[in-house]
Image (cartoon, rainbow, N blue to C red):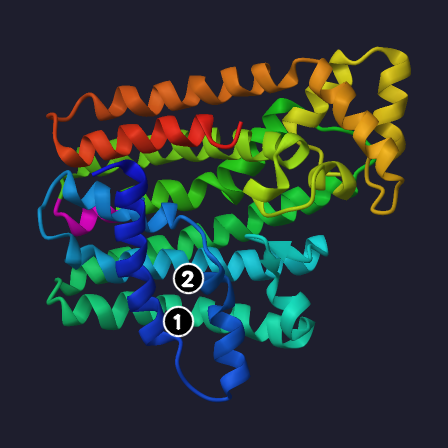
Protein backbone atom coordinates (compact mmCIF):
# COMPACT_ATOMS: atom_id res chain seq x y z
CA UNK A 1 0.00 0.00 0.00
CA UNK A 2 1.37 3.41 -0.99
CA UNK A 3 1.77 6.23 1.53
CA UNK A 4 -1.17 8.05 -0.07
CA UNK A 5 -3.37 4.98 0.30
CA UNK A 6 -2.27 4.55 3.92
CA UNK A 7 -3.04 8.19 4.70
CA UNK A 8 -6.46 7.87 3.09
CA UNK A 9 -7.27 4.66 5.00
CA UNK A 10 -6.16 6.19 8.29
CA UNK A 11 -8.09 9.41 7.60
CA UNK A 12 -11.25 7.43 6.81
CA UNK A 13 -11.13 5.67 10.18
CA UNK A 14 -10.47 8.87 12.10
CA UNK A 15 -13.03 10.90 10.15
CA UNK A 16 -15.77 8.35 10.85
CA UNK A 17 -15.00 8.51 14.55
CA UNK A 18 -14.99 12.32 14.53
CA UNK A 19 -18.28 12.53 12.61
CA UNK A 20 -19.90 10.32 15.25
CA UNK A 21 -18.95 12.94 17.85
CA UNK A 22 -19.93 16.04 15.89
CA UNK A 23 -23.67 15.48 15.94
CA UNK A 24 -26.21 17.50 17.87
CA UNK A 25 -28.22 20.69 17.99
CA UNK A 26 -28.21 23.46 17.01
CA UNK A 27 -27.42 22.00 13.61
CA UNK A 28 -25.49 25.06 12.43
CA UNK A 29 -22.96 24.61 15.25
CA UNK A 30 -22.18 21.02 14.33
CA UNK A 31 -22.20 21.75 10.61
CA UNK A 32 -19.65 24.50 11.23
CA UNK A 33 -17.53 22.38 13.56
CA UNK A 34 -17.28 19.55 11.02
CA UNK A 35 -16.73 21.87 8.03
CA UNK A 36 -12.92 21.69 7.91
CA UNK A 37 -12.97 17.92 8.42
CA UNK A 38 -15.28 17.54 5.43
CA UNK A 39 -13.24 19.81 3.14
CA UNK A 40 -10.13 17.64 3.24
CA UNK A 41 -6.73 17.40 4.85
CA UNK A 42 -4.31 14.49 5.16
CA UNK A 43 -4.79 13.87 8.92
CA UNK A 44 -1.04 13.75 9.51
CA UNK A 45 -1.27 13.97 13.30
CA UNK A 46 -3.70 11.04 13.65
CA UNK A 47 -1.53 9.07 11.24
CA UNK A 48 1.46 9.73 13.50
CA UNK A 49 -0.49 8.53 16.54
CA UNK A 50 -1.51 5.31 14.81
CA UNK A 51 1.84 4.47 13.21
CA UNK A 52 3.73 5.26 16.42
CA UNK A 53 1.33 2.89 18.16
CA UNK A 54 1.97 0.20 15.52
CA UNK A 55 5.69 0.27 16.25
CA UNK A 56 4.82 -1.36 19.58
CA UNK A 57 1.41 -3.01 19.14
CA UNK A 58 -0.65 -4.40 16.27
CA UNK A 59 -4.28 -3.45 16.99
CA UNK A 60 -4.27 0.17 15.78
CA UNK A 61 -8.00 0.52 16.52
CA UNK A 62 -7.00 1.18 20.13
CA UNK A 63 -5.25 4.35 18.98
CA UNK A 64 -8.19 5.85 17.04
CA UNK A 65 -9.82 7.77 19.96
CA UNK A 66 -6.53 9.45 20.91
CA UNK A 67 -5.76 10.10 17.23
CA UNK A 68 -9.18 11.70 16.74
CA UNK A 69 -8.73 13.77 19.89
CA UNK A 70 -5.50 15.30 18.61
CA UNK A 71 -7.06 16.00 15.21
CA UNK A 72 -9.94 17.81 16.90
CA UNK A 73 -7.46 19.94 18.85
CA UNK A 74 -5.62 20.69 15.60
CA UNK A 75 -8.86 21.71 13.87
CA UNK A 76 -9.83 23.92 16.80
CA UNK A 77 -6.56 25.82 16.29
CA UNK A 78 -7.15 26.08 12.53
CA UNK A 79 -10.61 27.61 12.93
CA UNK A 80 -9.33 30.29 15.29
CA UNK A 81 -6.11 30.76 13.30
CA UNK A 82 -8.09 31.50 10.13
CA UNK A 83 -10.09 34.14 11.99
CA UNK A 84 -6.94 35.82 13.31
CA UNK A 85 -5.25 35.73 9.89
CA UNK A 86 -8.42 36.84 8.05
CA UNK A 87 -7.99 33.85 5.73
CA UNK A 88 -11.02 33.14 3.55
CA UNK A 89 -9.96 29.80 2.07
CA UNK A 90 -8.45 26.56 3.33
CA UNK A 91 -8.24 23.30 1.37
CA UNK A 92 -9.61 25.29 -1.60
CA UNK A 93 -12.87 25.83 0.29
CA UNK A 94 -14.26 28.69 2.41
CA UNK A 95 -12.91 28.84 5.95
CA UNK A 96 -15.42 28.33 8.77
CA UNK A 97 -15.81 32.03 9.53
CA UNK A 98 -16.12 32.86 5.82
CA UNK A 99 -18.98 30.35 5.47
CA UNK A 100 -20.74 30.64 8.82
CA UNK A 101 -19.63 33.99 10.24
CA UNK A 102 -17.15 34.81 13.00
CA UNK A 103 -19.42 34.22 16.04
CA UNK A 104 -20.40 30.68 15.01
CA UNK A 105 -16.81 29.97 13.93
CA UNK A 106 -15.50 30.89 17.38
CA UNK A 107 -18.04 28.64 19.10
CA UNK A 108 -17.38 25.81 16.64
CA UNK A 109 -13.69 26.02 17.51
CA UNK A 110 -14.58 25.90 21.19
CA UNK A 111 -16.70 22.79 20.78
CA UNK A 112 -13.99 21.07 18.74
CA UNK A 113 -11.67 21.60 21.71
CA UNK A 114 -14.23 20.17 24.14
CA UNK A 115 -15.03 17.22 21.87
CA UNK A 116 -11.32 16.37 21.69
CA UNK A 117 -11.35 15.40 25.34
CA UNK A 118 -14.64 13.56 24.98
CA UNK A 119 -13.04 11.54 22.19
CA UNK A 120 -10.06 10.65 24.35
CA UNK A 121 -11.95 9.76 27.53
CA UNK A 122 -15.05 8.02 26.16
CA UNK A 123 -13.27 6.32 23.28
CA UNK A 124 -10.36 4.99 25.31
CA UNK A 125 -12.72 3.76 28.03
CA UNK A 126 -14.70 1.86 25.39
CA UNK A 127 -11.43 0.29 24.23
CA UNK A 128 -10.83 -0.90 27.81
CA UNK A 129 -7.58 1.03 28.03
CA UNK A 130 -6.17 1.41 31.54
CA UNK A 131 -7.27 4.49 33.44
CA UNK A 132 -3.66 5.46 34.16
CA UNK A 133 -2.96 5.54 30.41
CA UNK A 134 -6.09 7.63 29.73
CA UNK A 135 -5.05 10.14 32.40
CA UNK A 136 -1.56 10.36 30.90
CA UNK A 137 -2.96 10.95 27.41
CA UNK A 138 -5.25 13.67 28.77
CA UNK A 139 -2.34 15.38 30.52
CA UNK A 140 -0.32 15.37 27.30
CA UNK A 141 -3.25 16.69 25.26
CA UNK A 142 -3.72 19.55 27.72
CA UNK A 143 -0.03 20.43 27.83
CA UNK A 144 0.35 20.37 24.05
CA UNK A 145 -2.77 22.56 23.68
CA UNK A 146 -1.21 25.11 26.02
CA UNK A 147 2.03 25.03 24.04
CA UNK A 148 0.18 25.53 20.75
CA UNK A 149 -1.65 28.58 22.15
CA UNK A 150 1.62 29.99 23.49
CA UNK A 151 3.26 29.42 20.11
CA UNK A 152 0.39 31.14 18.33
CA UNK A 153 0.69 34.13 20.67
CA UNK A 154 4.42 34.30 19.94
CA UNK A 155 3.67 34.18 16.21
CA UNK A 156 1.22 37.07 16.55
CA UNK A 157 3.79 39.07 18.49
CA UNK A 158 6.44 38.40 15.85
CA UNK A 159 4.05 39.39 13.04
CA UNK A 160 3.10 42.67 14.72
CA UNK A 161 6.74 43.55 15.45
CA UNK A 162 8.50 45.99 13.15
CA UNK A 163 11.57 43.78 12.88
CA UNK A 164 12.44 40.20 12.08
CA UNK A 165 13.45 38.17 15.12
CA UNK A 166 16.40 35.85 15.63
CA UNK A 167 16.53 32.25 14.43
CA UNK A 168 16.32 31.17 18.07
CA UNK A 169 13.06 33.10 18.55
CA UNK A 170 11.62 31.67 15.34
CA UNK A 171 12.48 28.08 16.25
CA UNK A 172 11.15 28.55 19.78
CA UNK A 173 7.85 29.65 18.23
CA UNK A 174 7.51 26.73 15.80
CA UNK A 175 8.49 24.17 18.44
CA UNK A 176 5.34 25.23 20.26
CA UNK A 177 2.95 26.30 17.52
CA UNK A 178 3.54 23.30 15.24
CA UNK A 179 6.01 20.74 16.57
CA UNK A 180 4.19 20.34 19.91
CA UNK A 181 1.29 18.42 18.34
CA UNK A 182 3.61 16.29 16.18
CA UNK A 183 5.67 15.47 19.27
CA UNK A 184 2.56 14.70 21.33
CA UNK A 185 1.05 12.55 18.57
CA UNK A 186 4.10 10.29 18.52
CA UNK A 187 4.41 10.23 22.30
CA UNK A 188 0.72 9.34 22.78
CA UNK A 189 0.86 6.64 20.11
CA UNK A 190 3.79 4.98 21.84
CA UNK A 191 2.16 5.27 25.29
CA UNK A 192 -1.12 3.70 24.15
CA UNK A 193 1.00 1.00 22.49
CA UNK A 194 2.59 0.26 25.90
CA UNK A 195 6.08 1.39 24.92
CA UNK A 196 8.66 1.90 27.64
CA UNK A 197 9.77 5.32 28.86
CA UNK A 198 12.90 5.31 26.68
CA UNK A 199 10.88 4.54 23.54
CA UNK A 200 8.29 7.15 24.49
CA UNK A 201 10.99 9.84 24.69
CA UNK A 202 12.57 8.60 21.48
CA UNK A 203 9.30 8.85 19.55
CA UNK A 204 8.56 12.28 21.02
CA UNK A 205 11.96 13.40 19.74
CA UNK A 206 11.12 11.96 16.32
CA UNK A 207 7.85 13.91 16.25
CA UNK A 208 9.53 17.13 17.38
CA UNK A 209 12.08 17.03 14.55
CA UNK A 210 9.40 16.08 12.03
CA UNK A 211 7.21 18.97 13.18
CA UNK A 212 10.04 21.46 12.75
CA UNK A 213 10.73 20.14 9.23
CA UNK A 214 7.01 20.39 8.45
CA UNK A 215 6.77 24.04 9.52
CA UNK A 216 9.89 25.06 7.62
CA UNK A 217 8.39 23.68 4.41
CA UNK A 218 4.98 25.13 5.28
CA UNK A 219 6.54 28.59 5.59
CA UNK A 220 8.14 28.13 2.19
CA UNK A 221 4.79 27.15 0.71
CA UNK A 222 3.33 30.30 2.28
CA UNK A 223 5.38 32.40 -0.13
CA UNK A 224 5.99 30.07 -3.06
CA UNK A 225 3.31 27.37 -2.95
CA UNK A 226 0.84 26.61 -5.73
CA UNK A 227 -2.59 27.80 -4.50
CA UNK A 228 -4.23 24.77 -6.15
CA UNK A 229 -2.11 22.54 -3.92
CA UNK A 230 -1.88 24.62 -0.75
CA UNK A 231 -5.51 25.75 -0.79
CA UNK A 232 -4.42 29.30 0.06
CA UNK A 233 -3.84 32.42 -2.08
CA UNK A 234 -0.39 32.74 -3.64
CA UNK A 235 2.04 34.60 -1.40
CA UNK A 236 -0.31 34.37 1.60
CA UNK A 237 2.46 34.75 4.21
CA UNK A 238 3.88 37.72 2.31
CA UNK A 239 0.49 39.46 2.32
CA UNK A 240 -0.02 38.75 6.02
CA UNK A 241 3.44 40.00 6.98
CA UNK A 242 4.47 36.69 8.55
CA UNK A 243 8.05 36.96 9.78
CA UNK A 244 9.12 33.44 8.85
CA UNK A 245 12.64 32.15 8.43
CA UNK A 246 11.99 31.81 4.69
CA UNK A 247 11.10 35.49 4.29
CA UNK A 248 13.89 36.61 6.60
CA UNK A 249 16.45 34.73 4.48
CA UNK A 250 14.93 36.01 1.23
CA UNK A 251 15.29 39.61 2.39
CA UNK A 252 18.90 39.02 3.42
CA UNK A 253 19.76 37.37 0.10
CA UNK A 254 18.07 40.01 -2.10
CA UNK A 255 20.00 43.07 -3.30
CA UNK A 256 18.98 46.53 -2.07
CA UNK A 257 16.70 47.30 -5.01
CA UNK A 258 14.93 43.94 -4.87
CA UNK A 259 14.63 44.11 -1.09
CA UNK A 260 12.63 47.33 -1.42
CA UNK A 261 10.26 45.62 -3.88
CA UNK A 262 9.65 42.75 -1.44
CA UNK A 263 9.10 45.16 1.45
CA UNK A 264 6.63 47.14 -0.67
CA UNK A 265 4.14 44.22 -0.62
CA UNK A 266 5.11 42.74 2.76
CA UNK A 267 2.14 42.86 5.14
CA UNK A 268 -0.07 44.51 2.52
CA UNK A 269 -3.33 42.66 1.88
CA UNK A 270 -4.33 44.90 -1.00
CA UNK A 271 -1.56 45.22 -3.58
CA UNK A 272 -1.46 45.10 -7.34
CA UNK A 273 -1.05 41.53 -8.57
CA UNK A 274 1.85 42.67 -10.75
CA UNK A 275 3.71 43.90 -7.66
CA UNK A 276 3.06 40.65 -5.83
CA UNK A 277 4.19 38.58 -8.83
CA UNK A 278 7.40 40.62 -9.09
CA UNK A 279 8.14 40.18 -5.37
CA UNK A 280 7.56 36.43 -5.61
CA UNK A 281 9.86 36.20 -8.64
CA UNK A 282 12.57 38.06 -6.72
CA UNK A 283 12.18 35.71 -3.76
CA UNK A 284 12.45 32.74 -6.11
CA UNK A 285 15.68 34.14 -7.61
CA UNK A 286 17.31 34.42 -4.18
CA UNK A 287 17.51 30.63 -3.92
CA UNK A 288 15.79 30.68 -0.54
CA UNK A 289 13.74 27.59 -1.45
CA UNK A 290 16.86 25.42 -1.61
CA UNK A 291 18.16 26.79 1.68
CA UNK A 292 14.89 26.15 3.51
CA UNK A 293 14.59 22.68 2.00
CA UNK A 294 18.13 21.92 3.16
CA UNK A 295 17.22 23.11 6.66
CA UNK A 296 14.06 20.99 6.64
CA UNK A 297 16.04 17.99 5.38
CA UNK A 298 18.45 18.39 8.32
CA UNK A 299 15.58 17.94 10.78
CA UNK A 300 13.98 15.20 8.68
CA UNK A 301 17.27 13.28 8.69
CA UNK A 302 17.42 13.60 12.48
CA UNK A 303 13.90 12.16 12.64
CA UNK A 304 14.75 9.25 10.32
CA UNK A 305 17.91 8.45 12.29
CA UNK A 306 15.68 7.92 15.35
CA UNK A 307 13.45 5.51 13.43
CA UNK A 308 16.48 3.45 12.42
CA UNK A 309 16.87 2.39 16.05
CA UNK A 310 13.76 0.24 15.63
CA UNK A 311 13.43 -3.09 13.79
CA UNK A 312 12.31 -2.88 10.18
CA UNK A 313 8.51 -3.01 10.05
CA UNK A 314 5.59 -1.64 8.01
CA UNK A 315 5.03 1.08 10.63
CA UNK A 316 8.67 2.19 10.51
CA UNK A 317 8.57 2.27 6.71
CA UNK A 318 5.38 4.35 6.79
CA UNK A 319 6.88 6.90 9.18
CA UNK A 320 10.03 7.16 7.05
CA UNK A 321 7.97 7.68 3.89
CA UNK A 322 5.89 10.32 5.64
CA UNK A 323 9.03 12.16 6.73
CA UNK A 324 10.36 12.26 3.18
CA UNK A 325 6.95 13.31 1.86
CA UNK A 326 6.75 16.21 4.31
CA UNK A 327 10.08 17.62 3.15
CA UNK A 328 9.33 17.32 -0.57
CA UNK A 329 5.59 18.12 -0.61
CA UNK A 330 4.27 20.57 -3.18
CA UNK A 331 7.68 21.92 -4.11
Marks 2,1: beta carbons within 8 A:
yes
> In the image, is 228 to the left or to the right of 116?
right
Horizontal relation, residue 16 to residue 289: left or right: left
Task: Work out whether residue 241 or residue 196 is closer to the camera in this orientation and state it.
Answer: 241
Q: Looking at the picture, how far across and down is residue 315, in whole percent?
A: 18, 36
Q: How many marks?
A: 2
Which residue bears the numbered disc 2? 72
User: Which quadrant: the N terminus?
Assistant: top left
What is the secondary structure assignment of the residue under circle 1?
helix
Image x and y of residue 52, in percent:
22, 41
Point out the tag, 2 or 1, that comes first from the N-terminus.
2
Image quarter for residue 66?
A: bottom left
Q: Is residue 205 visible?
A: no
The magenta segment is 188-194
Q: How far across and down, in percent of the image, does residue 197 sit?
A: 18, 38
Residue at 17% from the left image edge and 60% from the top image edge: 132
Q: Which mark is residue 115?
A: 1
Magenta span main SS: helix
Q: CA distance from mark 2 to mark 1?
A: 7 Å
Location of residue 95 by image quarter: bottom right
Tell me which residue sits at (35%, 20%) in the image.
302
Amino acid sequence: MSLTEQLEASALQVNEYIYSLLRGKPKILYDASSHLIRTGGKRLRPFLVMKSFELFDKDARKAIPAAAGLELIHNFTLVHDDIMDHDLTRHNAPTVHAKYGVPIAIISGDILFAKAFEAIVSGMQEMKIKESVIIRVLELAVKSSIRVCEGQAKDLKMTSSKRFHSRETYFDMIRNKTAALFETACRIGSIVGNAGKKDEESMANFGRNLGIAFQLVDDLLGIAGDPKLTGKPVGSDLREGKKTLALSLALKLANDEDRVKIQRVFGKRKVMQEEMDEALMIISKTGVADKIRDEARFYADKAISILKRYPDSPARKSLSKLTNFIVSRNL
